[in-house]
Image: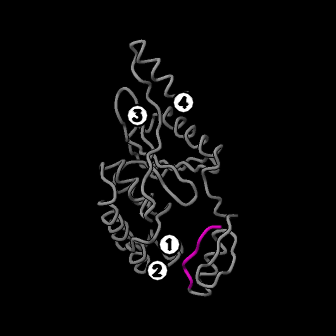
């Protein structure tokens, strides 16, 4: 029995409640994990909400081109709006910033490799905060579970949840449950060329038009 399970069993035997702790909930790796993680935290919905959130991001980008410029997006706003609505495309920091504003809720993104916590929507006066955890290529959602049930949104003043989220990330880091996107090795499945890191893959895709890669 794991230490956490043993502690919970002991607490129950003593008539105490199960202590609440941060838990990582697995979200399907379907290219929409960021959107599904946010949807679970905010709406208690997952994959049936992802396309709607992609549309929301696209609408925000198109409605405010002065903020969401080509320099920020990496492509013209109209092109980006079409791109992000493709269910094969991944979300990242831009989408988290837009969705934090959309829900008027901070989104804390915990990076397993660096243990850094980025707070999207910080300083905008939001009182609640959701948590996601990132392993380099995939997002999951963090919640708190225990004797009081499951909690998905937290006060922005809840520093204990921030520390618990870091502990979850630290455990994953120790287990090497992350992908180093700067140094991992890829192979182009179209021409079989070996590549190193995300930047090599992006450059190869731009030069060749090949977009099908596998890690090896």
Question: Closer to the camera: disc 3 or disc 4?
Answer: 4
Residue 28's image quarter? bottom left
**Alpha carbon separation for disc pair 1 and 3:** 37 Å
**Alpha carbon separation for disc pair 1 and 4:** 45 Å
Q: Is residue 161 above or below residue 42?
A: above
Instruction: Write the residue at 40% across / 16% down.
Output: 16
Residue situated in front as seen by the camera: 38 or 71: 38
Image spot of residue 122 (x, y percent): 47, 48
Image spot of residue 77 (x, y percent): 43, 77
Q: Which residue position is annotated with label 4? A: 2
**Alpha carbon separation for disc pair 3 and 2:** 42 Å
Q: Which residue position is annotated with label 2? A: 76
Does residue 212 show up magenta in the picture? yes
Which range of residues does the magenta coloring cover?
210-216
* Disc on the earlier residue, 2 or 4: 4
Point out the image quarter for the C terminus.
bottom right
Total of numbered circles in the picture?
4
Secondary structure under tag 1 reads: helix
Q: Which residue position is annotated with label 3? A: 145
Local crowd size for mark 3, using a 10 Å CA cut-off: few (<14), some (14–19), many (≥20) = some
Secondary structure under tag 3 reads: strand
């Amino acid at each position: 029995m794991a230490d956490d399970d043993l502690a919970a069993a002991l607490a129950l035997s003593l008539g105490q409640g199960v202590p609440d702790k941060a838990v990582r909930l697995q979200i399907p790796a379907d290219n929409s994990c960021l959107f599904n993680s946010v949807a679970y935290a905010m709406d208690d919905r997952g994959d049936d909400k992802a396309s709607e959130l992609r549309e929301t991001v696209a609408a925000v980008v198109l409605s405010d081109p002065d903020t969401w410029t080509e320099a920020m997006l990496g492509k013209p706003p109209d092109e980006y709006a079409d791109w992000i609505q493709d269910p094969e495309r991944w979300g990242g920091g831009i989408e988290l910033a837009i969705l934090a504003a959309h829900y008027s809720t901070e989104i804390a993104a915990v990076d397993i490799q660096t243990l850094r916590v980025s707070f999207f929507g910080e300083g905008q006066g939001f009182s609640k905060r959701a948590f996601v955890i990132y392993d380099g290529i995939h997002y999951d959602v963090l919640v708190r579970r225990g004797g009081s049930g499951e909690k998905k949104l937290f006060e922005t003043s809840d520093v204990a949840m921030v520390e618990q989220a870091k502990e979850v990330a630290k455990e994953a880091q120790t287990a090497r449950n992350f992908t180093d996107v700067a140094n991992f090795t890829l192979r182009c499945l179209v021409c079989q060329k070996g590549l190193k890191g995300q930047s090599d893959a992006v450059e190869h895709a731009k030069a060749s038009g090949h977009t099908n890669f596998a890690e090896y």
